[in-house]
Image (cartoon, grey):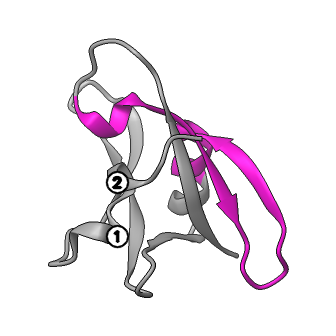
């Protein structure tokens, strides 16, 4: 399955990195128009299990999410770095 991340909800407080500050994210399956909300940990598991999640900007630039863990073992997802700044997960609007 493949989903587009449409917005993120951040948690207030100090975090190991800015991606860990993401508490949850809304997504849309563009193939069937199903949508939902997943926690950061649920999206980590979704991507880790071989599914695709991505951010797409208004120009159609697409960046896939990858599953990562911090040195302390905290699970998170982030976009693969590319030369396009507008397709970054952290640039999405707050839900």
Label 2 crowd (10 A; few <14 / some 14-19 / many >=20)? few
- Is residue 33 or residue 47 the one in the foreground? 33
Residue 39, located in which quarter of the rendered image?
Answer: top right
Where does the N terminus fall, quadrant-wise?
Answer: bottom right
Residue at the far top in the pictured view: 13
Disc assigned to residue 87: 1
Q: Residue at x 37, y 84 (%)?
A: 61
Q: In the picture provided, is 21 more to the left or to the right than 23?
A: left
Q: Are marks 1 and 2 in contact (CB under 8 Å)?
A: yes
Q: Position of residue 17 (x, y in %)?
A: 23, 32
Residue 77 visible to an observer of this rendering: yes
Left or right, residue 28 beside residue 6: right
Say what secondary structure mark 2 lies in: helix
| Residue that mark 2 sits on | 91
Count of numbered circles on the image: 2
Q: Nearer the viewer, residue 77 or 13?
A: 13
Coordinates of residue 84 in the picture (x, y in percent): 22, 76
Residue beneath the point at 20% across and 68% down:
81
Is 78 covered by the magenta stretch? no
Residue 14: where, in percent of width, then height? 27, 14
Q: Which residues are magenta?
A: 17-45
Residue 36 belongs to the span the image colors magenta:
yes
- What is the x, y in percent for residue 35? 79, 60
User: Real-space Cα distance between discs 1 and 2?
Assistant: 7 Å
Q: Vertical placement of 29 versus 47: above or below?
A: below
SS of the residue at dot 1?
helix
Is residue 49 among the parts visible in the rendering? no
């Amino acid at each position: 399955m493949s989903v587009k991340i449409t917005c993120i909800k951040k948690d207030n407080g100090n975090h190991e990195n800015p991606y860990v500050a993401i508490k949850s994210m809304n997504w849309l399956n563009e193939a069937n128009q199903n949508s939902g909300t997943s926690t950061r940990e649920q999206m980590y598991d979704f991507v880790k299990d071989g599914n695709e999640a991505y951010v797409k900007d208004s120009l159609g630039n697409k960046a896939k999410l990858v599953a990562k863990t911090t040195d302390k073992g905290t699970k998170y997802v982030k976009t693969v770095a590319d030369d396009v700044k507008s397709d970054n997960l952290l640039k999405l609007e707050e839900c």
